[in-house]
Amino acid sequence: MVRIKLGWLFPYSGIFKHLKKDLEQGLALGWETGGGDQVLVSCPAFIQTGSLKDTEDALKRLLLYEEVDLVIGVVSTKVALNIIPLVEKQQIPLLLLNLGADIPTRTLQSPYLFYNSLHLWKSEWTMGKWAQQRYGGEPAINLSLYEAGYGLHEAFKCGAAVSGATTAKLNIVKNFSPSPDVSPLIQYLHLQQPAHVHALLSGKEGELFLQLFHEQGFHHKIPLTVNPFMVEDGMPCEIEAGTTIFNASTWSRNLDSAHNRHFVTNYQARNNEYPHAFTLLAYEAGLALASAVGTIQGRIDSASIVGALEQVCPVGPRGELHFSTRCLQTRLPVYIRQSMIAHSSGLCENRIMATADGIEWNDPSLDGEQPISTGWQNPYLCV
């Protein structure tokens, strides 16, 4: 039986508390669904919160000591740009999974680098364009210092500008304390009275913001759009009856396609829990890897996997998959979703209200937003 030695780069996440398990479960289901019949031998490496040094050290161990055939890991785009020379020197394929909090750059390119992302930057651009077109006026973008280290607020602002926004308020609150406090954001809104509000927060900050937004009566006065992870399917959420909250994502658990229904149903049956964004990314990686290996005639090794991953385009829950970075493609639809509380469970549920094409990463209008030499190194929500 052919054995493929797979290296993993696992970061810590306080938001997704079982990230390692979730990724492994997603990949295993995708591998089996794609018809993979070789033995995958896993070599895990923990990269803390995904800094460049921790990632480099772990990657060197996988490449030089474990001598893996392929590396899959949750790595930020900023760090990825700095580790390309290492994988090129060893000629080992590296498949990155991340939520896409930064807009890709033209230097994110290598024959040995493959990329699968939720492309949150694209969702934020679409949300900005859609919200500004719907509500008009001056928007207020509300975020913490943590979210400010990524490109999501800039993507939202660019989208809103396409629909006519000439100015936008940017409200930032510090959140590096044991007891997070987002009340300054609410105070800003009282003073500014914006035409519509966008909240880019995560974890406890997101929960508190929604709670205060309702307590202050803003949900009856000002339209609200949010980061999709503030209103993730299946989470408890402070959404009162009659409140309208919109968000956008390139994937939704209730996406009505045969491939998505198959993924969600089988993942839930197999693991007794619903999938989330990271399990989706790992599942798609498993599909692509199984498809690639299935096309290889002869010896299965790093070189043959590189060539096969470059060519295959399997279909997954979000449609046709393209992982190559030599011609990076982000042609995924974006789903505008309305968040509400499900009567049966009392938990948050997102219903798809519209579908948009969004924008591509190499659109000239984004050129000014693409340099990402500054900001956080950790993958988004991996803190």
Image (spheres, rainbow, N blue to C red):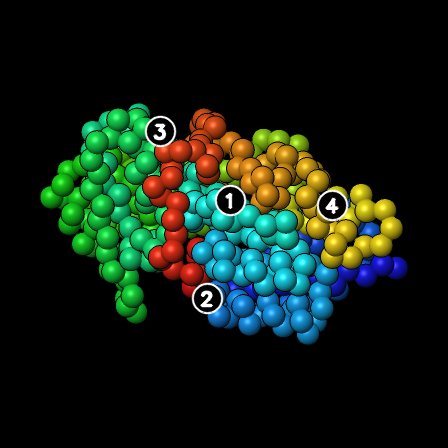
Amino acid at the residue labelled 2: Ser
**Badge 2 is on which residue?**
51
Of circles 2 and 3, the one toward us is 2
Q: Position of residue 249 (x, y in %)?
A: 46, 39
**Badge 1 is on which residue?**
118
Q: Are marks 2 and 1 in contact (CB under 8 Å)?
A: no
- Relative side of 66 to 226, left or right: right
Q: Quadrant of residue 218?
A: top left
Q: Residues within 10 Å of mark 4 (few under 14, many from 20)?
A: some
Amino acid at the residue labelled 3: Trp
**Badge 4 is on which residue?**
308
Amino acid at the residue labelled 1: Leu
Structural distance between the alpha carbons of marks 1 and 3? 19 Å
Of circles 2 and 1, the one toward us is 2
Task: Return the disc, 3 or 4, that comes first in the chain's sequence.
Answer: 3
Task: Return the disc, 1 or 3, that comes first in the chain's sequence.
Answer: 1
Q: Which image quarter is the N terminus in? A: bottom right
Q: Quadrant of residue 239?
A: top left
Of circles 4 and 1, the one toward us is 4
Residue at the image point whose x is 78% and y is 57% from the top: 301
**Badge 3 is on which residue?**
130
